[in-house]
Amino acid sequence: MKLYNDSKPFECDLTASKCIFWKFLPKPQYLYDKYPQVEGVKPLSEADLLPNKSFSSIVYDLPFIVSNGAMSKIKERFTHFESVEELYQANDEMLERSFRLLKKQGLLIVKTMDISHGNKQIWISDYVIRKAEELGLELIEKFILLSNLRLFARTHQQRVARKYHSYFFVFKKKSTAPLNKVKALLLDFDHTIFNTDADCEVRKNSKVKDWDLIFSKIPEYKLYDGWSEVFDDAKAKGIKIAIVSTAKKELIERTLKHFQLDCDVIIGWQRCYKKPNPKLVEMALNKLKVNKEDVISVGDDVVDKLMSDNGGVRFIGAIWDCEHEESIQELKQGTVLNSPTDLLSYI
Ligand SMILES: C[S@@+](CC[C@H](N)C(=O)[O-])C[C@H]1O[C@@H](n2cnc3c(N)ncnc32)[C@H](O)[C@@H]1O
């Protein structure tokens, strides 16, 4: 509360139980539990009727013990799950519920711990972090609560480390919609991947183009620092890359070859379609065999943004060498990358 909530009480506890947490602390105003046990705590089903974005802070503390069959009576349900699957499922549901109920920038505090069950290690804390991040919750803090360090079992044969610590994770709901797992990148060519000013005179300013002369300028192009790393990382993760440009396809192919870069699809200059026509996005998606929700498009020009918006794909501006000064201001209205490697955090 002190560090992350301006010393204010949290607003809602979704697993209030007997409110042991709040014995020496100000209680949240809204208390729920799947199995309410004390006055003032409402059934969790009521929380599910609340509208989206109802709270600015939520706490939950699910059971972490998986019983071995002997403890399946109803009274044990407050503290035990019957199977590991149920433990995962309860965390999934609670994260999804919390995400729905949280306002943008809202805080979620999750108490959890890892366990060993049978011969298996159940890293539920790592699972919670992964799942939360997928939903659009950013981990901003881990408080680790240590208990008496009884690392060695006296009574039975020990096979794995005993787990006598638990976590209080602090997540913040991100302000942008969560991304699907990115499956492909649509990249602009000029001034996004390469500075191609070396051929400016011959390529952009002449009507009849001397292609041999233009191709001879390729070694003078500049590949912006960081792209090799991004291409390698994308390849390692199975993320496809398409280049969507008004430049001639052969020029792009030759340039990539010269700079030893690989991509999956090139949509070059088209007679019928010019940026910002979304047909270009559609052509790239069809060739890549991916859906528009799974794609990030990157470009340095407002026309790239327009094309992406028209095509329904998420756009991020590349502002390291915008050809047109006014583009920078326009792109800065949305998400931008200051260098190609900034893209790594999105993929
Ligand atoms: C460890 S207790 C919470 C203790 C609480 N923090 C306190 O201060 O007293 C776990 C709570 O989770 C609730 N619970 C158990 N299974 C659940 C499930 N599948 N979904 C939601 N809540 C559940 C139980 O009713 C129980 O009150």
Image (cartoon, rainbow, N blue to C red):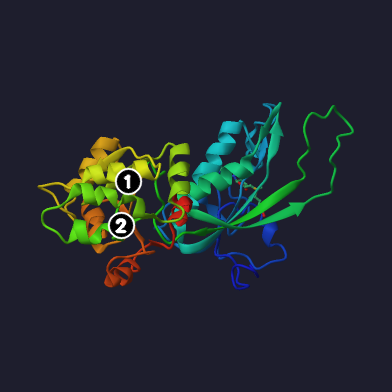
What's the residue at 31%, 50% (across, down)? 218
Taking the spot 57% from the left edge, 47% from the top edge, the residue there is 129
Q: Do the residues labelled 2 and 1 touch (CB within 8 Å)?
A: yes
Question: The residue under label 1 is which amino acid type?
Answer: Thr
Structural crowding at the residue carrying mark 1, measured as other residues with C-alpha within 10 Å and reported as few (<14), some (14–19) or many (≥20): many
Name the residue carrying label 1. 255
Look at the image and tell me in which quarter the N terminus lies. bottom right
Q: Residue 105: horizontal and vertical position, in percent?
A: 48, 64
Q: What whole-number distance in Å separates the C-alpha atoms at marks 2 and 1?
A: 10 Å
Q: Can residue 240 be seen in this view?
A: yes
How far across and down, in percent of the image, does residue 155 sit?
A: 88, 31
Q: Residue 44 shows which numbered tag? A: none
Answer with mark 2 or mark 1, whichever residue precedes in sequence. 2
Residue hosting label 2: 196
- Which residue is found at the position 25% from the left and 46% from the top? 251
Q: In which quarter of the image is residue 286?
A: top left
Which of the 4 image quarters holds residue 224? bottom left
Vertical order, 246 against 235 (above or below): below
Q: Provide the secondary structure element on which disc 2 rests.
A: loop
Mark 2 within 8 Å of ligand 1, using the beta carbon: no
Pick the front one: 268 or 279 = 268
Q: In this view, does 300 lie to the left or right of 212?
A: right
Confirm whether residue 267 shows in the render. Answer: no
The kind of residue on which mark 2 rests is Thr
Left/right placement of residue 225 relative to residue 301 reads right
